[in-house]
Image (spheres, rainbow, N blue to C red):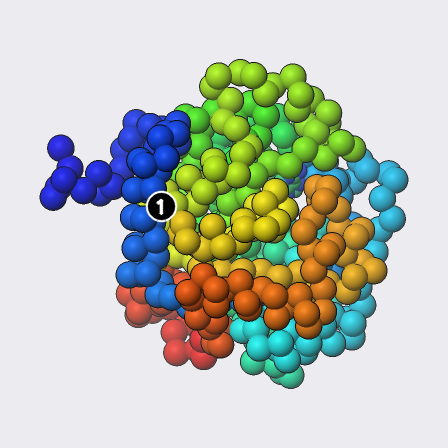
Amino acid sequence: MKINNNPFSGLSKTEIITWLKEDDPEKLNELWQHANSMRREHVGDEVHLRGIIEISNFCCRKCAYCGISVLNHDLQRYRMDLEEIVACAGEIENYGFGTVVLQSGEDFFLTKEWIAELITKIKTITNLAVTLSFGERIGDELVAWKEAGADRYLLKIETGNPDLYRKIHPRQNSPWENRIDLIRFLAAAGYETGSGIMVGIPGQTFEDLADDLLLLQELNIDMLGIGPFIPHPGTKLGQEYRHLRNDKNQAPNSEIMVYKVNALIRILCPDINIPTTTALATINKTSGRELSLSRGANVIMPNMTPVNYRKLYEIYPGRICLEEFGEEAVEAIRGRIFSSGRKISTGQGPSPSYLYKLKENTNNKYIGRRL
Ligand code: 5AD
């Protein structure tokens, strides 16, 4: 029995699976309402805007779902130069955003020193928080970038199931365990740490998703992005996809499944920041962001990569960001936030979960830093 008859307190794996399989609209409404009130109570009504710059589409990985994998020989590759990126960060600040997210494929031509210089420049001329998303880099680099002023790091686990992980990351030297170790390392190095999963990967079951949610809760992560798997026809998984759709244990890559995972993670980890992912906004361009904001999310990450590069960062087809650029697009996003009855944050917007960690750990050398 649940305390106070609250059906959501201390969700067990079985209960999570039941929610993931639930399709009664009234019951689901209860889930949305509860996630929404947890969101309001723990992270408030503000929506944080983060501008993403995709600084390079070179990648040494062979991820079986991703369009910028090194195996895609047809793709034209690019690397932005330092001045271009810094100018773009300035633009992000002028739009009133509090954070820039620097993202790239796993590109080791972007050296430790070059990235440190980039971070230092951005931190010198703007007041932006800097989030990095450069894949699995080595500890020495991660520490150097933290010391150069980076605030946050995103490293998705994609799935918590090591066998499924191996299947979708074939011929990869680095096992699933390495990602988990790196996530712990990032948190210990003082980063506000983010991760994420894809929903509806071919071969992913409802049980896998429930395990993922509990694992992410245990990892004590500060930011979590949940997106649907979107088949890319130029990838191995994109081609296999048709054959897996009818299996009854297969978790669907549907919009509603993403909302369920989104809402459940808000309930399990109430103090974290949850973005509405671009992948979700891609499968429902008209109201994906609004629905996700009302079912647990509190962050939107508009793409601010210069348009000529953006179309080359094709991790999956049809990305909504190809239609969104310039001042008009930013205004439209602001409008969507207002019409959802929410406020736009003007600060850097760290998660309460990270702020609690800073307070608790009195020996933490990052205490006292401006947030
Ligand atoms: N469908 C959905 N998300 C994808 N990503 C990459 N390829 C796909 C796809 N086909 C997401 C992954 C990855 C990030 C770069 O983009 O979560 O970590």
Q: Quadrant of the N terminus?
A: top left
Between 107 and 261, the one lying in front of the other is: 261
Residue 227: percent from left, percent from top: 55, 43
Q: Tell me what residue is drawn at x 80 percent, y 68 percent.
A: 81
Q: Is residue 282 left or right of residue 189?
A: right
Residue linked to disc 1: 32
Q: Amino acid at mark 1?
A: Trp
Between 143 and 80, the one lying in front of the other is: 80
Residue 217: percent from left, percent from top: 36, 45
Between 179 and 34, the one lying in front of the other is: 34
Figure quarter occupied by ligand 1? top right
Q: How many marks?
A: 1
Can I make out residue 222 in this image?
no
Q: Quadrant of the C terminus?
A: bottom left
Q: Is residue 194 left or right of residue 328?
A: left
- Above or below — where is 17 with respect to 93? above
